[in-house]
Image: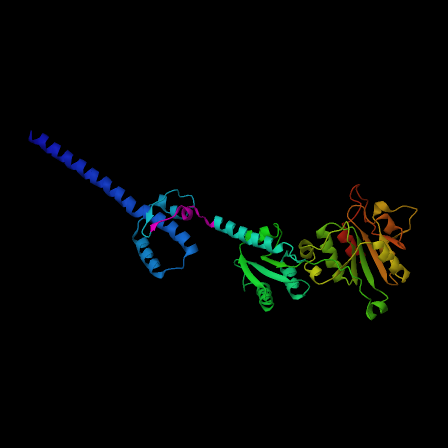
Amino acid sequence: MANMQAWKTSFKVFLASDRTRNKCLVGLKELYLTPFTQRAAYSCTRALFYPRDKSDDRSSSSKFRKTFVPKQHKYAANRDDNPKSAKTQRGKVSSELQKLRFEDFSESETGRVLRHIQKESEPTEGTQLEIVFGVAPCLLALTQNRRKPSRLFVKNGEGPKREVILRLCQEAVRRGVQIQRVSKQTLDKMCGGKVHQGLCLQASPLGFITEERPMTSHDVNNHRALWLVLDGVQDPMNLGAILRSAYFLGVDRIASSIHNSCPLTPTVSKASAGVMEVMEVFGYSNLKDMIKVKAEEGWQVVGTVGLEQCSPESAVVPCSDFKMSRPTLLLMGGEGYGLSPELHQMCDVLLTIPPRRNLHPGVESLNVSVATGMLI
């Protein structure tokens, strides 16, 4: 009997100690795990909206040092999908803050900036703005004084470590242009996903020069003047590459048809490495009239044709055999059909670039920007 009574007493003590142990574990879990995850989530969102409080940092850091967190809960505070919601030491966290994510913040920032840009880009009293992107286009757009800059957008993290970024920001400050730091996501949306190199500039657009200007004494005495005439070039990347080559190789003027041609867009400026910001492009509603006037002044009109357009009836000269002896208009046709028939008939000479091999059908011609650079 004595042994049975001792056994029952021991069993009751065991049950009591087991219940106490379970309560302690639950209490520890509520005391340590829940406040840690929720306080970290609260501190994460609090940093976005309120200034830093050093006293809070000291108290929170000391509490974190004393807190033991099991391995399975180590990164729970850093996940944005934690569904738990409870009280913190500073009160309840609102549902809006609990749902807030850093990605959501960047998206809202992007939307806010883009809406502001769209509003400013709407035509008001004949003024319209566009987004120039890329280091060289933005720098030259600021320094050449052909545009009216409104705002410079710089990617977060870009700074004095890149000398060109520092110089560009200095130019913006000197000209009273507002500088705003934004995320890469915002810049991507501003320029339609094109390569912006961490910079975008909101500024007035550039267009064709449509008013004819009197020729200077240098132009009159320049017997080797070369004007490049573009008839229906529609690809902005081609147009930008043509501008870059023409500027580098010394073309005196670039003329383009206004209709059925690519306008001077920020994409053209980027493809030209900023040359569009420096070199004026003249636009003509009727290239035929301009060519006729220059021909009457003694200019030579030189057209270009591809290999597939050569025929026994037309006198086509390989470009390597041509010698420029007087002021010349070099006519380049568009990507699809080349020179229009009416301009083709006005040419004094037709040039072609002969291939160095037998060509497969369908690839008998060069890209118009490459051909233009070779002919210049």
Picture quarter containing residue 252? bottom right
Q: Which residues are magenta?
A: 91-102
Q: Position of residue 253 (x, y in %)?
A: 79, 61
Instruction: Tell me which residue sits at (56%, 59%) in the image.
Output: 154
Residue at the outermost bottom position: 217
Q: Quadrant of the N terminus?
A: top left
User: Was residue 101 drawn as part of the magenta stretch in this picture?
Assistant: yes
Residue 217 position (above or below residue 126) = below
Left or right: residue 313 compared with residue 90: right
Q: Quadrant of the C terminus?
A: bottom right
Residue 273: where, in percent of width, then height? 68, 58
Whether residue 39 appears in magenta in the rendering, the answer is no
Residue in the foreground of this view, choosing between 335 and 99: 99
Relative to residue 175, is residue 240 depicted above or below?
above
Along the horizontal axis of the image, is 222 left or right of 205? Answer: right
Q: Residue furthest top?
A: 1
Does the image show residue 42? yes
Tally of numbered discs: 0
Relative to 160, is 334 above or below?
above
